[in-house]
Each structure stands twice: as structure tokens, then as C-alpha cells.
Amino acid sequence: MATPTKNILLDEQLCFALYTASKRFNHFYAEALAPFKLTYPQYITLLALWENSPMTVRELGSHVNLDSGTLTPLLKRMQTQGWVERNRDENDERQVNISLSQKAIDAKPEIFAHVNTCMDLLGMDEKTYAETRDTVNFAGERIKNADPKTVPYTGDDEL
Amino acid sequence: MATPTKNILLDEQLCFALYTASKRFNHFYAEALAPFKLTYPQYITLLALWENSPMTVRELGSHVNLDSGTLTPLLKRMQTQGWVERNRDENDERQVNISLSQKAIDAKPEIFAHVNTCMDLLGMDEKTYAETRDTVNFAGERIKNADPKTVPYTGDDEL
DNA sequence: ACCAAATTAATTGCGTACAATGTACTAGAA
DNA sequence: TTCTAGTACATTGTACGCAATTAATTTGGT
């Protein structure tokens, strides 16, 4: 008996909500960071480095969830613009150490102040902000541990 | 007197939570849709068309929140793979009407069934899923209405 | 009807994302 | 030591995402 499959409506999908919200935040940060000529992925790279510098490309990638294929060209652009320095590790030449430039160290307070001012535009109180973030992180954890490859597709699912 | 600026930690940022969760969902769907050779943006394009076909590129873009620069090449790829048809509007030749192919119409039940099965892996009950989605949409609305360009950057914010 | 302004797609260029592959290097086993 | 995995990063190829520009077309004022 062919059970009718549950309908899927675009505007009801959690994935679409995340996809859309993420793009809007990206656009928001693009404007907030424009005075510094930083993109959003570059900004989170700096956030990671401001917390811990230097780091290898691998360590950095584990913090910002990006692989070398993305980070290498991104870091080269940031190097060109004077935000970071890239140096081969002397003991293990497979590794490249990424460190903050003086410019990045100096700019931190200005960037934090401007971003914080922009964030005030959201009009979200601390509690709502934190709850939203935790809710999103919870969903992110769930999805991380789900692997659709374990779901067999026979070519005639329920048909 | 220089008030110390509030610190910004990567793992406490809502934007980073959304950014990460969105990428994980993207990866999840990439695997779930692999049997159909569909990417996530292509899938949401189909979702929009299954609800309403045909649509012009502009109408479609307003549903999936993508502009022609993204949609035009995406739709051309989907046309090549036989998912959609593209036809100049006869009355207004500026517009291109996008319609579902028979293949897309036929595949809908299979795709819905497989995606729904994959979604079960998340182990989120209906209520949690809906609440998470609404929370994300609320944040997305907030960010949509915030414009950092209205925040002057003098180059010496609080310095 | 005529022409300037507005509209709509397509095109272009840059910057991510990420899988797959390649290369250089390290370290442990025989 | 030499062979073999394994590791770390770079490179390649495909696909977005979006701003800016261009081209074609329509529309609105005269």
C-alpha cells in the first residue's frame, strides 16, 4: 500500500530558514566589515586568531570549519592585505603557521567597537540572542551526527 | 575615557552558529540528494517550482532568495540535466519562463520519500523542528531589517 | 510616434565552499 | 636504513552568491 509521502513546502523547511538567515547575516557582516575591507570568512578567521595566534592551517581550519582548499587562497588574500603572516614550520615543513600581523593586532579594538555598534541594530536582548544561538547550535549538532549515506536508496523508495 | 569594548568570541556568535549549521545542512542535503544528482540550491529551486510552475526567473528568485546572477547558470545546468525548461516569454521577451520538465514532475514522489527518510535521521520531533525553524526565521527577519550602512564609521570609533 | 527612464536578464569578476587529487614531508615498521 | 603509511598543505574543478556592468526591451511623458 503506497502511503502518501508527506508534502515538503519550502517555507516550512528548517534548512531553508538556516540557509536564508545565514545569507542575510553574511550580507549584514559584509556591510559592517566594509570599512575594513574584510569578508565574513576573513573576519571569523581573525576572530579565531585573536583568540589564539599563531596556529597552523589545520588548527585554524578546525576552529572555523574550513578546509585547506578554502583557507589557502583566503589566507593568501589576507596576507596580501597585511592581516596575517604565513610561515613554514621549521621543524615540520609540511605545516604552515599563520600569525596575526601588527595591523591585525592594532585594528582589533576598532573592529570590535564597530561590529558591536552594528550588532546593536538587531535589537535583540542578550537573552534572546543567546537562546537563538544555542537553539541553532543544537540543530547544527544534530545534523552533524546524521549521515544520509546510511539511508539506502534503491531507486524505488515507497513506490 | 575609553570604555573597554566588549570582547567577541567566535563560539559565542550567532552568525557563526548560523554559518556553521547552514554549511552542515548543506552537506547533509548534498548527500541526501546525491542519488538524484541535485545540489541544495537546485533542490530548493525544484521545491519552489513544485509549488508553482511555471515562474519567471524573477519570481523564482523572490521565492528562493537568489538573484539572476546565481539563478541563470544554475537553471542552465538544471536544463542540461533535464529538470527544467527555459522559454522566453512571447509577450515580454525580457522574461524567461521556467517550467518543470516531465522528469521533475515524475521524480517528485521519489525525492520527497527519500528526503523525508533522511530527515528522520535528525531525530527532531515536529515541535522542536518547528520551534527551531521559527526561532531562526525570527532572527533572519531581524537581520534583514538592519542596515550597518546607517552606522557611521569615522575611523576612530571609541578610540 | 518619439525618446528618455526604468525594468529585466544575461554577463563578468571576485570570493568562498568543498571533494578529489597531487606533492612534500614525517615517522614507524621491518 | 629503507619502505610504507600517514599527515599537512596546495592545487584543481565544479558550483554557488552577489555586486557591478551590459544589453535588450518596455514604458511613460510629451
Image: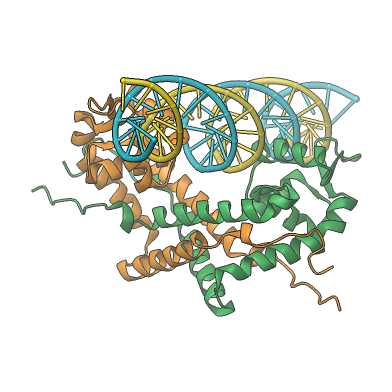
Chain colours: A orange, B green, C cyan, D yellow
Where B118 sits versus A19, above or below?
below
Name the spot of residue A44 as percent of width and height, x first.
Answer: 35, 44
Question: Is residue A110 or residue B93 the one in the foreground?
Answer: A110
Residue lying at 74% horizontally and 70% vertically, measured from the top left: A7
Quadrant for the C terminus of chain B in the image: top left
Residue lying at 34% horizontally and 54% vertically, measured from the top left: A119
Question: Is residue A111 or residue A139 the one in the foreground?
Answer: A139
B68 on left or right of A105: right
Q: Quadrant of residue A32?
A: top left
Question: Is residue A65 or residue A74 the one in the foreground?
Answer: A65
Is residue A44 visible from the viewing direction of this image?
yes
Residue lying at 30% horizontally and 67% vertically, measured from the top left: A126
B41 on left or right of A57: right
Name the spot of residue B147 as percent of width and height, x first.
Answer: 43, 49
**What is the tally of numbered marks visible in this picture?**
0
Where A152 sits versus B89, above or below?
below
Where B132 sits versus C22, above or below?
below
A31 on left or right of A8: left
Is residue B149 visible from the viewing direction of this image?
no
Name the spot of residue A128 as percent of width and height, x first.
Answer: 37, 69
C1 on left or right of B44: right
Name the spot of residue A46 as percent of width and height, x first.
Answer: 30, 40
